[in-house]
Every structure is written in structure tokens, then in C-alpha cells.
Amino acid sequence: MAAASSTSKVQTSLTVSFALSCSSSGESIKAEGADDKNVDDSGSKKSCFKYGEKYYFRVFKTSGIDGYEFTVSDGTITDEGAGQSITKSEDLEFKKTDTASTSYPITEISSITWMGTSLGTIKQSGDEQIQAETSGVAAGTIEFTSTYDLWSISVATKDADTYKVVIYVEETT
């Protein structure tokens, strides 16, 4: 009598998510301290803020984000000016492709300096994406302008030597 053989069948699966509302695909919000604004009287970057002083921060958003709101664990948020510009510089890598992404939304590209292999001229192809003239393996430093909103937060005096505050930024729908 022959032994029974077991055969396995080829299979795959797929998962899809459904939700009450969907956030914009490929969109982002980024917040960071405004180091050039958070300085002491001598112009040095501050690492400590006294109660009542302002801590300045920037909020960058891609074009598909209509608005955002803050939730803070404590303190008062103040609008210090919308639509301000800053020059950013980032190292990018191309890995057998003609596209690379930046960490910040691009308002305008100033230049690219190729390190070794050049993929030619570049152009903006998305809020945080650039496209080179040709595809390949290369590295370069891009300089570009990004637009942000400037905010500050201050906290009233507390009975604590050190007091941490969380600033949560969320897209509004």
C-alpha cells in the first residue's frame, strides 16, 4: 500500500482597512524648535527656559493639510507669524531611481551639489520629493526653501525645579 502524500496549496492574503474618515495620503506635519529664536542675550542657543519665557517652535505642513490644532499638557500657545521661510540643506540618496525625498516641504529648490555621480538637473515632483533628470545610484546635497508657521509657548511658574510640557500637533479635518 502506498503512503498517503500531503500536498500544500499555494496561497496569499490581502488586508484592507476602512475608517470613518481618511487622512490625506502622503501628507505630513513636522514640528521643531526654532533654534535661531531660542537664544540667550549673548546669541547662544538656550537649552533651559525659565518659567514665563517663550519657547519658539516651527510647524511645517504639506500642501494637502488645510489646518492643524494644538493640544498641550500645560502652557499658553501664541501665534508668532504664518508663512515664514527658511533655507534647508539635506543630503539625499538615489538608489537606482530618479526620485528622492526631503524631510521638509519644498517651497523652492535653490541648488543641488552632486557627490560623485551626477543624475543631472532636478525638479520638484511633490511637496517633499524631487526628481532627477536620470535614474541611478548617487548622493547629493540639496538646498531649498521651506515655509513654516512660527509659534511660541510659555508656562506660568510652578512648584517644580524642572517641568516638562508636551505639545501635540494634529491635522484638522
Image (cartoon, rainbow, N blue to C red):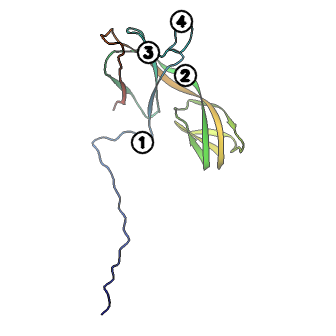
Asked which secondary structure carries label 3, the reply is: strand
Quadrant containing the C terminus is top left
Is residue 71 toward the left or the right of residue 43 in the image? Answer: left
Which marked residue is nearer to the observer: mark 4 or mark 1? Answer: 4
For image coordinates 52% across by 32% down, the residue present is 105
Is residue 129 toward the left or the right of residue 31 in the image? Answer: right
Q: For label 4, count other residues whose C-alpha is less than 10 Å away and answer few (under 14), some (14-19) or many (20+).
A: few
In the foreground, 30 or 83: 30
Q: Position of residue 109 (x, y in %)?
A: 62, 32
Which residue occupies the extreme front position in the image? 161
For image coordinates 53% across by 37% down, the residue present is 128
In 3D space, how far apart are the residues under numbered discs 2 and 3 (Cα atoms)? Answer: 19 Å
Q: Is residue 80 visible?
A: no
In 3D space, how far apart are the residues under numbered discs 4 and 1 (Cα atoms)? Answer: 43 Å
In the foreground, 142 or 50: 50
Give the number of the disc on residue 15: none
**Amino acid tagged 2:** Ser
Give the number of the disc on residue 41: 4
- For disc 3, the marked residue is 55
Mark closer to the chain start, 2 or 1: 1
Which residue occupies the extreme left position in the image? 20
Asked which secondary structure carries label 4, the reply is: loop
Give the number of the disc on residue 25: 1
Which marked residue is nearer to the observer: mark 2 or mark 4? Answer: 4
Asked which secondary structure carries label 1, the reply is: loop
